[in-house]
């Protein structure tokens, strides 16, 4: 008696897992449309309608929003040595490989200087990165601290508030 009940439970769990997988793959609205319960609009049409409504009104009955596109300055890959503490408590050296981009606002005064000062920005970033310990880079706090300090240095070296954000594409400690 227990065996058919166990088989039924496994089949039910497999079915629910399958439905969950399909829902993740095509989205809830796609699942409803597949089941014949959804409307005639596709997900893309719903998204286009939502964007059109946003363009018509800023949410406060005022003028439409203007989308600000900020340029991105990619930096060549940076590889530096960082300090680590070995299992015996001794100091060891490890490599930090970093690929990053800087988002900046070209409408801010001094933004044009950033491209001309790219090599100085990179030098400042490398000076900072070489001083780091591997434990400084762990967790979300370490990543946030790294981005904040790189942004602060970009603003200082560029003599402008144009740098808006530092984006980390890849970070590997080896």
Image: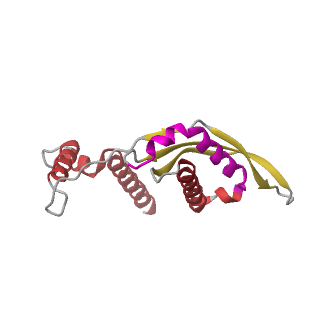
Q: Position of residue 115 (x, y in %)?
A: 50, 38
Principal secondary structure, stretch drawn in magenta: helix
Q: Position of residue 129 (x, y in %)?
A: 67, 50
Identity of the residue drawn at 24% across and 49% down: 66
Q: Position of residue 87 (x, y in %)?
A: 83, 57
Which one is nearer the viewer's eye here, 87 or 151? Answer: 151
- Quick check: is 121 in the magenta stretch? yes
Count numbered badges in the picture. Answer: 0
Q: Position of residue 89 (x, y in %)?
A: 85, 60
Identity of the residue drawn at 18% across and 50% down: 55
The quadrant of the picture occupied by the C terminus is: top right
- Quick check: is 65 in the magenta stretch? no
Examine the image and state in which quarter residue 142 appears: bottom right
Which one is nearer the viewer's eye here, 60 or 156? Answer: 156
The quadrant of the picture occupied by the N terminus is: bottom left
Which colour scheme appears in the figure?
A: secondary structure
Q: Vertically, is 6 above or below 45?
A: below
Which span of residues is magenta-colored?
A: 108-134
Which one is nearer the viewer's eye here, 109 or 169? Answer: 109
Examine the image and state in which quarter residue 6 appears: bottom left
Query: In this image, 94 relative to 58: left or right?
Result: right
Identity of the residue drawn at 14% across and 51% down: 56
């Amino acid at each position: 008696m227990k065996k058919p009940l166990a088989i039924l439970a496994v089949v039910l769990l497999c079915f629910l897992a399958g439905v969950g997988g399909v829902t993740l793959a095509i989205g809830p609205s796609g699942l409803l449309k597949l089941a014949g319960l959804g409307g005639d609009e596709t997900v893309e049409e719903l998204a286009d309608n939502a964007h059109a409504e946003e363009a018509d009104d800023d949410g406060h009955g005022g003028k439409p929003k203007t989308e600000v596109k900020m340029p991105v300055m990619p930096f060549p890959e940076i590889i530096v040595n960082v300090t680590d503490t070995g299992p015996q408590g001794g100091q060891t050296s490890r490599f930090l490989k970093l690929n990053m981009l800087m988002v900046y606002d070209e409408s801010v005064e001094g933004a044009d200087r950033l491209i001309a000062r790219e090599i100085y920005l990179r030098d400042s970033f490398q000076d900072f990165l070489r001083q780091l310990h591997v434990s400084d880079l762990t967790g979300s706090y370490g990543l946030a601290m790294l981005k904040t300090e790189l942004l602060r240095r970009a603003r200082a070296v560029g003599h402008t508030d144009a740098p808006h954000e530092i984006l980390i594409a890849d970070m590997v400690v080896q």
